[in-house]
Amino acid sequence: MSLEPLDIINGVFSIIFVAISIMVGLIILSRYFRYRERAYFYVGSTWMFLSSSWWPSCVSFLVALNNGVGITEELYFLIGNVFVPLAVVLWLLAFTEFLYTEKRKQILMIVGIYGLLFEILFFIFLFVNPNIIGVLNPPVDVNYRYFVMFFLLSFLAIVVVTGILFARLSLQSDDLEVKLKGKLLIVAYITFTVGALLDSSIPLNAIIIIFTRLILIASAIFWYGGFILPKWMRKLFLKKK
């Protein structure tokens, strides 16, 4: 079985997005080892695991280059979903470092139980009837059923809502660089949400795949800027008076 052009485009742009996301995550995470601030560890890990929904596309595409069919449906579902609750918990660990600190245990307990419920149901369906989870269009495209989509959208909503609350904290600062970080984070959450929704809710063609993955790549760069703000971003967005 030979790969279709659409499969190649999908696989290549998945690899680009995931590679950039992992690089961004590792750069942020490396700040933890330099400054010993836990927030950097949580935030860097969060972004890497948020991109995990696109990991199976990468793996299946690379495998398909050799066998023409990619990985199995069960393995695809497993790689693409099992790490998402972890990403949400890691983000909330970072979020509650700064906001709702006094309610940290309650927030983490509620979301942890919710994530555990998803994991239990997911593994039951994975072994009993994978069709409840979704249908794989080999080697790189997947259509998830309502069960997975409901949980994924709810996890996304948790990250986006708390993320905007977190960004608002930076927007209230008088420091122009801190305020810029808040703006970049809001753009990161918006672009990631738009890209993820488009990628999962509409039929894919070459133009849509490229467009949505470029939006997702942009979200990774804005996330990087929102927490690290490298010199080139300062020069680009902040005018010296």
Image (spheres, helix red, strand yellow):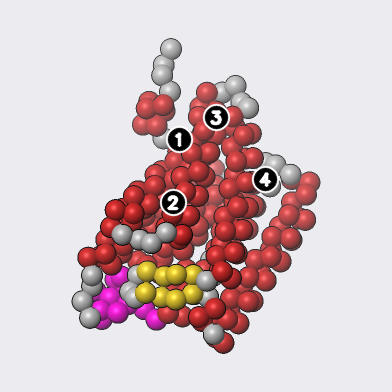
Q: What amino acid does circle 1 point to?
A: Leu
Residue name at image x 61 percent, y 73 percent: 119
Please state if 238 lies on the left or on the right of 10 as rendered: right
Find residue 36 and report its horizontal and vertical position in percent.
57, 46
Disc 1 is placed on an element classified as: loop
User: For residue 178, which numbered disc appears in the image?
Assistant: 3
Q: What amino acid does circle 3 point to?
A: Val
- N-terminal of the two: label 3 or label 1? 3
Cα distance between the residues tagged 1 and 2: 22 Å
35 drawn magenta: no
Numbered marks: total? 4
Q: Are there few (<14), some (14-19), or many (20+) residues within 10 Å of tag 2? A: many
Find residue 147 and report its horizontal and vertical position in percent.
58, 71
Please state if 37 lies on the left or on the right of 107 as rendered: left
**Is residue 69 in view?**
yes
Q: Are there few (<14), some (14-19), or many (20+) residues within 10 Å of tag 3? A: some
Residue name at image x 52 percent, y 71 percent: 145
Q: What amino acid does circle 2 point to?
A: Gly
What quarter of the picture does the C terminus occupy? Answer: top left
| Residue underneath mark 1 | 229
Range drawn in magenta: 61-72
Q: What amino acid does circle 4 point to?
A: Glu
**Is residue 60 in view?**
no
Residue name at image x 69 percent, y 65 percent: 114
- N-terminal of the two: label 1 or label 2? 2
| Residue underneath mark 2 | 195
Residue name at image x 53 percent, y 38 percent: 186
User: For residue 97, which numbered disc appears in the image?
Assistant: 4
